[in-house]
Image (cartoon, grey):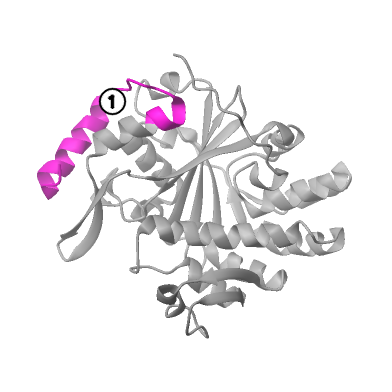
Amino acid sequence: MEKKEKKEKKHSKLKVFFIIIAVILILLLIGVGIGYSFINSKLNKINYDKIDENTIEVTEGVTENLSGYRNIVLFGIDDADGYTGRSDCIIIFSINEQTKKVKMTSIYRDTYVEVPNHGYTKINHAYAYGGAALSMSTINRNLDLNIKEYVTINFQVVKDLVNEVGGVKINVTSAEASKIPGITKAGTYNLTGEQALAYGRIRKIDTDYQRTERMRTVIDAVFSKIKKMSVAEMNKIADKILPELHTNITKSEITEVMTDVASYSIGESTGWPYKVNGKMINKVWYGVPQTLEESVEKLHKDLFDEENYQTTETVRNISNTIINKTGVK
C-alpha cells in the first residue's frame, strides 16, 4: 500500500510522547543534562499497575492487521476522590514504529458503544465499571484496535500543576466566561488552577471535541511555561505530579523510548467518531456514531493508511445493533 509522503515539521521534545506530564518533565530534565540515576529516581515515583493482558479483549485478526504500529491510550479521570470515576478524556496515540510519527485521536466521552458485559452505553462509563482493562477492551472491540498499554491521570492534578507554574494565559470566549469562577466576560486571562480546570471541563456550550480541545489548550500552556523553568523548578513539579500518574508501561519501556525521543514527531489530531447524532435514550443524552462501521473504516484509513479497510464482523454487528436501537444510520 502506497503511503502519502508529507513534509514533517520538527517538533519539540515536549510534544513527542503521550502528552503526559510526567514523561515530558523527565525529557526536559534529560535535555538539560541531568544524569540517568536522577531520572531513574523520578521514574520510580510513577505508579506502575500490573494488568493481565489476557483480560484485555482484542478481536481476532486485528493485531496482525496493525503490525508496525503501537497504540497507547491516555485516560483523563475527572474524579476528586481518586481513579475510580469515568474517563472524561480518552486520547489514542497511534505510533508508526518505522517513521516514528504519532497521530492522536480524541474519543468523544458520550459516544454510544457496546461495553463488554455492560450493554450499550457511553464509552467513558467503561472506566468506572472496570478500570483501564475494561476501557481498553471497549475501545478495541468497537474500533478494531489492539490497545494494551495505557496511562491514566486525574484531572485534579492539572489544577495543582497550573498553580505550580503560576497560572496559564488562556483566551476565553463569552460563552466560556460564564462557566469559569471569577470570569465575567471574554478576554485573555491568566487562569488559576481552579479556573483552568473549570475551563477544561466546560460542557454543553459546544461539542465534546471542543471540550477535549480546551483541556489540551491548558496542558499546552502549562508545557510552554515549564520549558522556561529552571531544573530546580522542574524537579519540584516532577515530585508533585509523578506520584499521581498510573500506567502499565514498564519503567524500562519508558526509558527505552526516552533515549530515542528526538526521532518522534506529532502528526494529525482528530476527534472520533467523525459524524455523531445526538440522541436522548431513556432520558440520557448519547453521541450516536453515524455509523460506527463507517467511522471505524475512516479511522483505519487516517491512522494506518488502510485505503480499503473492512471492519471485523464484531464491529459490523455492533454497528447494526446501534442502528436498530437508535434508528440513527
Asked if residue 112 is among those painted magenta in the image, a careful observer would answer no
Q: Residue at x 70, y 31 (%)?
A: 263
Q: Is residue 27 above or below residue 216?
A: above
Residue picked out by circle 1? 312
In the image, what residue occupies the spot 44% across and 51% down? 131
Q: Is residue 329 visible?
A: yes
The secondary structure that most of the magenta stretch takes on is helix
Residue 154: percent from left, percent from top: 54, 61
Answer with left or right where residue 260 lies relative to residue 289: right
* Image position of 189 (left or right of 27): left
Locate residue 194: give its quadrant.
bottom right
- What's drawn in magenta, residue-wise? 300-329
Quadrant for residue 292, please give it: top left
Tell me residue 25's x, y (percent).
73, 53
Q: Give the residue type that dot 1 points to.
A: Thr
Residue sitting at x 36%, y 21%: 307
- Viewport quadrant of the C terminus: top left
Along the line of sight, which residue is nearer the eye, 176 or 254?
176
SS at mark 1? loop
Measured along the vertical axis of the image, is residue 15 above or below residue 229? above
Q: Residues within 10 Å of mark 1 (few under 14, many from 20)?
A: some
Q: Percent x, y for residue 171?
A: 55, 69
Q: Position of residue 116 (x, y in %)?
A: 29, 43
Rendering quarter of residue 227: bottom right
Q: Does the segment drawn in magenta span residue 301?
A: yes
